[in-house]
Image (spheres, grey):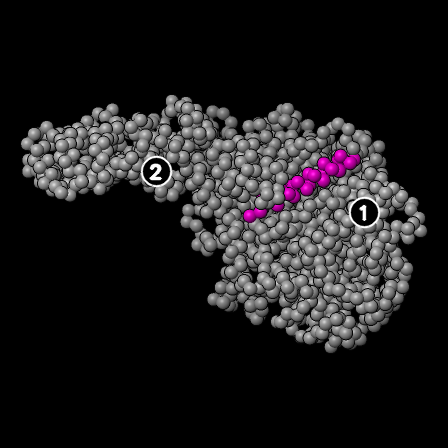
Amino acid sequence: MTSELDIFVGNTTLIDEDVYRLWLDGYSVSDAVALRVRSGILEQTGATAAVLQSDTMDHYRTFHMLERLLHAPPKLLHQLIFQIPPSRQALLIERYYAFDEAFVREVLGKKLSKGTKKDLDDISTKTGITLKSCRRQFDNFKRVFKVVEEMRGSLVDNIQQHFLLSDRLARDYAAIVFFANNRFETGKKKLQYLSFGDFAFCAELMIQNWTLGAVGEAPTDPDSQVDDMDMDLDKEFLQDLKELKVLVADKDLLDLHKSLVCTALRGKLGVFSEMEANFKNLSRGLVNVAAKLTHNKDVRDLFVDLVEKFVEPCRSDHWPLSDVRLFLNQYSASVHSLDGFRHQALWDRYMGTLHGCLLRLYHD
Amino acid sequence: MPGKLKVKIVAGRHLPVMDRASDLTDAFVEVKFGNTTFKTDVYLKSLNPQWNSEWFKFEVDDEDLQDEPLQITVLDHDTYSANDAIGKVYIDIDPLLYSEAATVISGWFPIYDTIHGIRGEINVVVKVDLFNDLNRFRQSSCGVKFFCTTSIPKCYRAVIIHGFVEELVVNEDPEYQWIDRIRTPRASNEARQRLISLMSGELQRKIGLKVLEMRGNAVVGYLQCFDLEGESGLVVRAIGTACTLDKLSSPAAFLPACNSPSKEMKEIPFNEDPNPNTHSSGPSTPLKNQTYSFSPSKSYSRQSSSSDTDLSLTPKTGMGSGSAGKEGGPFKALLRQQTQSALEQREFPFFTLTAFPPGFLVHVGGVVSARSVKLLDRIHNPDEPETRDAWWAEIRQEIKSHAKALGCHAVVGYSESTSICEEVCILSASGTAAVLNPRFLQDGTVEGCLEQRLEENLPAGCGFCHIPYDELNMPFPAHLTYCYNCRKQKVPDVLFTTIDLPTDATVIGKGCLIQARLCRLKKKAQAEANATAISNLLPFMEYEVHTQLMNKLKLKGMNALFGLRIQITVGENMLMGLASATGVYLAALPTPGGIQIAGKTPNDGSYEQHISHMQKKINDTIAKNKELYEITPPEISEEIIGSPIPEPRQRSRLLRSQSESSDEVTELDLSHGKKDAFVLEIDDTDAMEDVHSLLTDVPPPSGFYSCNTEIMPGINNWTSEIQMFTSVRVIRLSSLNLTNQALNKNFNDLCENLLKSLYFKLRSMIPCCLCHVNFTVSLPEDELIQVTVTAVAITFDKNQALQTTKIHVEKSLQRASTDNEELLQFPLELCSDSLPSHPFPPAKEHLESASSNSGIPAAQRAVTVEKASPMGEGNFRNRSAPPCANSTVGVVKMTPLSFIPGAKITKYLGIINMFFIRETTSLREEGGVSGFLHAFIAEVFAMVRAHVAALGGNAVVSYIMKQCVFMENPNKNQAQCLINVSGDAVVFVRESELEVVSTQQPTANCQPSCTGGEVTT
């Protein structure tokens, strides 16, 4: 006796959260059944393995049919085939677009292309996430990227509108899209200590301050094919950043800046002497990072540079975070007192963001 | 020109990409009705076209309006080649043809293609302007309402229940026409869908005409079926119950009818009945004249010869019931005459209803059924479907005579079905023989008086159990006792019926689903030989199914079956029997005895031991079941039961062979108690297996109940969460040396596993009950068995359920007490109130369990229940008040029941009757057979919901999947499935919302005639 056909269709589509998770995690039906058996569900419910197998198959089939709709979540809301309560719809979408920290760290900043997709095998082996799940996550990134790529307006809003994600998840996707678009390097060994959250935090600050969308309200000419408001860095701003070079190139200015900072921080900093000794190096590092951002390649290395030029030196001197904060506050603020420096607004736009990023990046 | 149909095509959405180059579609729509076609403009390059068309107007006869469906075809415009069809929508406009139903059909319909399934949606608005037609000889029957519901619909009152209507139409099946060889599968499927739609329209119209002839205005319990006879054609047939219904202006007014009469119990003496005829007890009474006069016109012409037998039976039953003694006797006789005379006018006094207005059902005789095996032949002249008509007439005649043998003049809960395999067809009909109250069968003139007296005389809750037949002349051996409720009338020891449990019946404990399953191998044969072989097998199958049911009923400690449905399915090499029913313990019937096992070889020690071991197991199971289903009948000592039945005690026995002589009985008497035991003899391995199979049925896990009737006896307070579902399983039998035993085991496992799966899947709804569990078996191929189950899971509040049970028992005991107060062991206060406010101990356990739980307020419990179940529609409720901003899809509930728990049905919008075909030539790509059928059923649900929503409804009640024919050819990567569903589209309002409405604007919706007093009940 073999079961040829075995289905269950409810007027309200039954969604089992546990099975959904197993499906999203890319387990095959038999693996999922084995995992469910291990969870002790048979003992709790008195069911047999055959029942579990049939149930799992059913859910998998449903999810498979829903997947097409999940690719365009508004469709899930308007479709007539599956009657699903709104709260469940939200859950389906949110879980489908959720991703694994380990996975996202592997692809963050990489081009979402076929080439990367080929590497998913390796990522799967490395992270222990099933290939199927890797593919789903990768395809999600790519899909969101494709949809919002050409859109104007707030990146987060666009994502939220087209994928009906929660605010938190939409922000994460904005970061992923932003990183993929600007191809920031995140995979280097020295960056391994950083979490996705660290990068997402920086991405949000950069989107808010360094992109076209950040400067302007609406562009004056709506037809002008300006770059994507939130996804591309403001080219003009990056060009202008060269002007900051004077802060380190002009020796007087550099000395003055150092003395202003040292005066203000004397006695307040545990690592004052180290700071004093390192000031010029640090300042040169930070300003040079800014000056280099005209080149695409250097933009990509932004995080590598920040870590190399600032985070690592401070860390090797064992600066506590509070001291880093005090230093950065003073370092940015003191520039306002440099009479010979004319690019105050530019400095604030640069340093304001960098300040937040560096504090976030500064940990073990 | 009695009607104008107006159609507007508004927009489309989610259309498929038809042009690969642009990834877009140039869509336009053809709107066709009858032979007229309109087209919209082509909406270029969009998957969400906005046609916003003008109103397309069709001027048509109302006959066409009834027969024809509106056909909407969405196409992709192609400049250079033929336009590609995207899909179609068929809209049945029947609901727009009667005044009380829908006024407009407007909404999003899934665009359906028989090859690709649903491909996007289309927004359509349909209206009908009807002109009054005074033509007497009209062919249309606009205005007759149809209901699938097998009881009087909730917001109507039955003025007269006229009786049985039936009709069938036949045609050639397009799939088997020569043209099918040259047309595409799509064209063939569409031709079939269209034909069936046309035929059901025609059928409905013809039935409607018959109803008008009978002066009715509605058909209740409308059941339409298709017989796909293959080469020999396509038969669409329908049966129903013609009624005259009155719309109740307030939906609440219908309910309290049954509460009042008890007070007046003894005030109206028997003799003072205003109807003078009631005095006469003889068979030849002048009353006949009176009752003749009402009768519907149709039946005169078709007066059948059988009325002679009718009359000949009368004196006998009249005398017989006299001997049954006590005051009920003469009345019963009178009643019978009255009813009989009312009924004998009809060719077939059948009623498709399964639940009745209070007082309608007087006595129930038992299940009557008839089957016949026919060889299909080509239907030569579709306009004269005489053979098919004659076949059914024959079967109905048999049913009628069976009913008569039971002393009954009517059959209720009547249904018909077929099973076809190649050219052999089994026709089956079954129902419950009953004696009815003539009041509802006549004009409203005698309304009131008779009914009232009736209810008083026959104590509510047990009256229907009293035997209608003459005990000295019993049609079959039965063991009669005095009714355990009123002690006045005789009742049988078990009662089998096809109807729902009457609402006033007194039940102890809860009910449960009981199934008998059986397979019999049969040699493959052709034509006549095949038919003969089947005919020979049938009686044995019936017998064994019946035996199994009886055994299982005893094992559950219960004494009555409701909703019994026995399905016999024929396949190439086997016959399958599946009987489902809901077992209950009726307080009026005697406590069932246990099951005794008797061995054939009493000297063998180890064998003896084995037997006693089995006996113990059975006894344990019975005890366990009694506990599980809370069957704790109040202990009544032997004397109270009254005078012993004069006849010698007959032992009900189950004999393996029918030739056993009666003196063996004493030998086998192993029963220790006063109760009669049911004896199972184990004389061969067969019987051994039977006993084993009895014990393999596992009860549902705790928190679950199941039944195949509308409601579960013993559970009264449903919460609003419902989940309707369909589950299909197909198993392939290993063809090697199949035996009956192996087959039985396979089939049994299939059903049991299916149930287990359901319990597992729905575990988040606990405590819950699967209601209206409907199993259908088919044998699509040699080694395939297909089982389809449709049911609804309803959650209930455990705490309140117990309390209501308690009240129920109290009520029943009180009723009993009014008759024989002195007989009860505990003192009773007779309250005039029908709902006592203070509890008294009816049965210890009930009270204990009730009080132990009553600490938690019900409302609080309800909240926790909702929280505990993350799934389902409980979650909807919070959102339903302000419609969710971003979701445009309204929730449509579907249920096979006639009601929605926790809600009131305020309007019936019309019947939904849909037929779909789905075919694929890429079975593997669509996820194999399971993926294919899963998607198809989901699509069918979606289309039903869309139609209901477009009618302005929010639920389908009495939903039924009448057919699910699945055929596959995995080698060719093909599969095809036909599904036929029906139900009643309704508008319901949550009871909580209703209260708000009624308090805020108490008279806003009331018509002048409505007295608002009862709204609050």
Above or below — where is B6 with respect to B152?
A: above
Magenta segment: does it hold B379?
no
**Which image quadrant is residue A34 in?**
top right
Residue lying at 9% horizontally and 32% vertically, measured from the top left: A254
- The residue under label 2 is A172
The label on residue B612 is 1
Q: Amino acid at mark 1?
A: Ser
Residue A135: percent from left, percent from top? 44, 29
Question: Judging from the image, what secondary structure is the residue with disc 2 in?
Answer: helix
Disc 1 packing (10 Å; few <14; some 14–19; many ≥20): some
- State whether residue A317 appears in this view: yes
Tell me the chief SS of the magenta region.
helix
Mark 1 or 2, closer to the camera: 1
Provide the chain ID for the residue under circle 1.
B
> Which span is picked out in magenta?
B740-764
Residue lying at 49% horizontally and 25% vertically, measured from the top left: B81
